[in-house]
Image: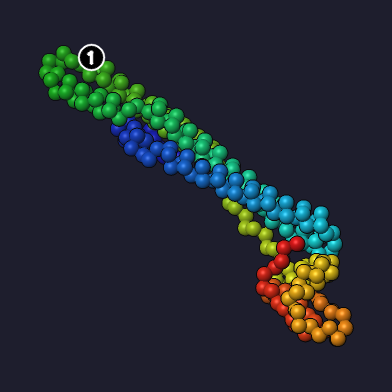
Amino acid sequence: MPNFWALPPEINSTRIYLGPGSGPILAAAQGWNALASELEKTKVGLQSALDTLLESYRGQSSQALIQQTLPYVQWLTTTAEHAHKIAIQLTAAANAYEQARAAMVPPAMVRANRVQTTVLKAINWFGQFSTRIADKEADYEQMWFQDALVMENYWEAVQEAIQSTSHFEDPPEMADDYDEAWMLNTVFDYHNENAKEEVIHLVPDVNKERGPIELVTKVDKEGTIRLVYDGEPTFSYKEHPKF
């Protein structure tokens, strides 16, 4: 802790009055609150998507996808709570500043005391102003004590507000490309019949005399969806479908 008692009121009062104030701290608190809201919104959206997947399909791939995603959902929850906590701490620090500023001796009052004391000393030729000078010096000592005490309490309040702030954890790793392709392939095994009906119009030149169409949907490591006819690729689509 800085030694505020070693600083005269001219310095302590001037510093807190000329500082940027609580505005930047409150703006930072609002930013952290906004981040917490966005993280919470993302978590809710992801959780909703997982719930929708479970309602439409339950199997090895859906369970694997959920197992891969749940740690990320938990990370979103924890990080949102952390961001909100920082916003609360910053707000507490801003409130501590406002209370300290209100309790500090105004710099103008300190300057007036010093000017009046100097003038009285200059004309105190016969000691006629000695009592008034002593009163001014006593007032100045009280200003010194008040400013130092307020700054010390302010410092402690800020330290208490931010002492429990910890670092953010990195988000957990999701499935790699191979795992993602495997999960999607398994899901497509379930949806294959519907997939055939939806993409049959994409291969209109199939020779009807070759027998029934055999369409197999696969997702390769690069994430490209391929439709295979009699072992030969007939169509590929780079984006993952929504199901």
Asked if residue 230 is positioned above or below residue 99 in the image, the reply reads below
Give percent across and percent down for residue 234. Answer: 74, 81
Asked if residue 231 is positioned above or below residue 222 in the image, the reply reads below
Can residue 56 be seen in this snapshot? yes
Asked if residue 2 is positioned above or below residue 48 in the image, the reply reads above
What amino acid type is highlighted by mark number 1?
Answer: Thr
Name the image quarter holding residue 178.
bottom right
Q: Residue furthest right?
A: 211
Residue under label 1: 131
Out of 183 and 171, give the one closest to the viewer.
183
Is disc 1 surrounded by few (<14), some (14 to 19) or many (20+) residues within 10 Å? few
Question: What residue do we see at 54% from left, 37% from top?
Answer: 160
SS class, disc 1: helix
Out of 94 and 38, give the one closest to the viewer.
38
Name the image quarter holding residue 117.
top left
Work out which quarter of the rendered image holds the C terminus and state it.
Answer: bottom right
Question: What residue do we see at 40% from left, 27% from top?
Answer: 102
Can residue 8 be seen in this snapshot? no
Out of 221 and 141, give the one closest to the viewer.
221
Give percent across and percent down for residue 213. Answer: 84, 79
